[in-house]
Image: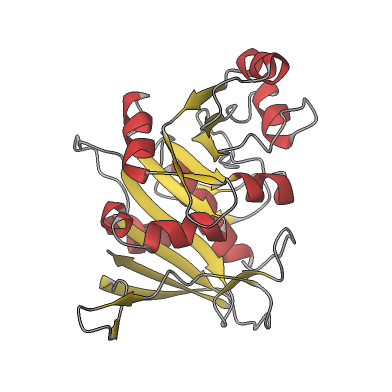
């Protein structure tokens, strides 16, 4: 995990003042030992609850102040987790871009069917080679890993981790993971806190019962924009009571709202 700071200066010229750090501190991992990793669900959304304009389309929502906040959050977690669709669409670096930083979160990529083929051109591996980040651990359900892909990851310090997969009903052979298994594996790898950044399928899966009980904190950046219909929306599956009446899927407690530039950041606990 990246070292704790009271005032953060970004290599991109962004800053995150100590007063803002204090606003978020109670929602972040502590040093106390846990039986599973501390899980923070964090993402940026539009006013119509969209993460992007369309699947696979990179959409910038965060302003400079909330972007600096995101990098600060990365500095306080030992791992950062995304789905393979986000990896393919964004080619992210998944590091902490803080001036003088000597440690970074471990990128975790959820890739059940090995859709991502590692290449030395990938930003996450280039940064790893330059000492500005770590190579990813790839969570997959595939038994036979291509030798070339395994060799590239191993060369940079990453690896594949096979996790028991579950058939996704009605999805033509697609599989998913039990999040208890995923977080159990990360705990065994010595990763005590995980920052979930996306994408939509990952976020919605974790908000669904029974997995939302695994989420400790939620930190959402709300940008002052409507993206319109057809976007990737944060909206977990409908839940009904025993009489078939719809009920809320989950509700936040200990809620606080903070302005960061033109964005508003919502913090809460599940």
Residue appearing at x 36%, y 30% in the figure: 185
- Residue 60's spot in the image, x, y percent? 69, 65
Between 180 and 129, the one nearer to me in the picture? 180
Residue 17 shows in this picture: no
Residue 62 spot, x, y in % from top left: 61, 66
Q: Is residue 164 above or below residue 56?
A: above
The structure residue drawn at horizontal position 72% and vertical position 16%, both measured from the top left corner, is: 148
Q: Is residue 207 above or below residue 122?
A: below
Viewer can see residue 122: yes
The residue depicted at 27 percent of the width and 83 percent of the height is 244
From the top left corner, tell me how far across and down residue 97 is, in percent.
60, 42
Residue 207, quarter of picture: bottom left
Q: In the picture provided, is 149 more to the left or to the right than 96?
A: right
Q: Viewer-proximal residue, 121 or 84?
A: 84
Q: Quadrant of the N terminus?
A: top left
At x 67% / y 52%, what residue is drawn? 13
Image side of residue 88 versus residue 255, left or right:
right
- Please state the total of marks drawn on the protein image: 0
């Amino acid at each position: 995990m990246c070292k704790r700071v009271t005032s953060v200066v970004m290599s991109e010229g962004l800053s995150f003042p100590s007063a803002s750090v204090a606003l978020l501190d109670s929602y972040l991992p502590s040093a106390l030992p846990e039986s599973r990793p501390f899980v923070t669900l964090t993402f940026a959304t539009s006013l119509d609850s969209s993460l992007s304009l369309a699947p696979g389309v990179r959409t910038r929502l965060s302003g400079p102040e909330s972007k600096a906040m995101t990098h600060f959050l990365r500095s306080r977690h030992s791992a950062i987790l995304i789905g393979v669709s986000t990896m393919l669409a964004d080619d992210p670096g998944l590091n902490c871009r803080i001036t003088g930083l000597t440690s970074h979160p471990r990128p975790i990529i959820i890739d059940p069917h090995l859709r991502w083929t590692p290449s030395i051109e990938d930003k996450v591996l280039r940064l790893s080679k330059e000492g500005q980040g770590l190579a990813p651990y790839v969570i997959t359900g595939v038994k036979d890993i291509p030798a070339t892909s395994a060799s590239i990851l191993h060369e940079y310090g990453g690896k594949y981790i096979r996790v028991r997969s579950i058939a996704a009903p009605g999805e033509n052979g697609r599989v998913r993971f039990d999040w208890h298994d995923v977080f159990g594996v990360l705990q065994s790898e010595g990763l005590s806190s995980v920052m979930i950044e996306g994408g939509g399928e990952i976020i919605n899966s974790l908000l669904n019962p029974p997995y939302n009980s695994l989420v400790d904190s939620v930190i959402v950046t709300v940008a002052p924009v409507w993206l319109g219909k057809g976007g990737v929306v944060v909206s977990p599956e409908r839940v009904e009571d025993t009489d078939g009446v719809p009920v809320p899927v989950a509700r936040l407690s200990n809620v606080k709202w903070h302005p960061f530039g033109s964005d508003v950041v919502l913090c809460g606990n599940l």
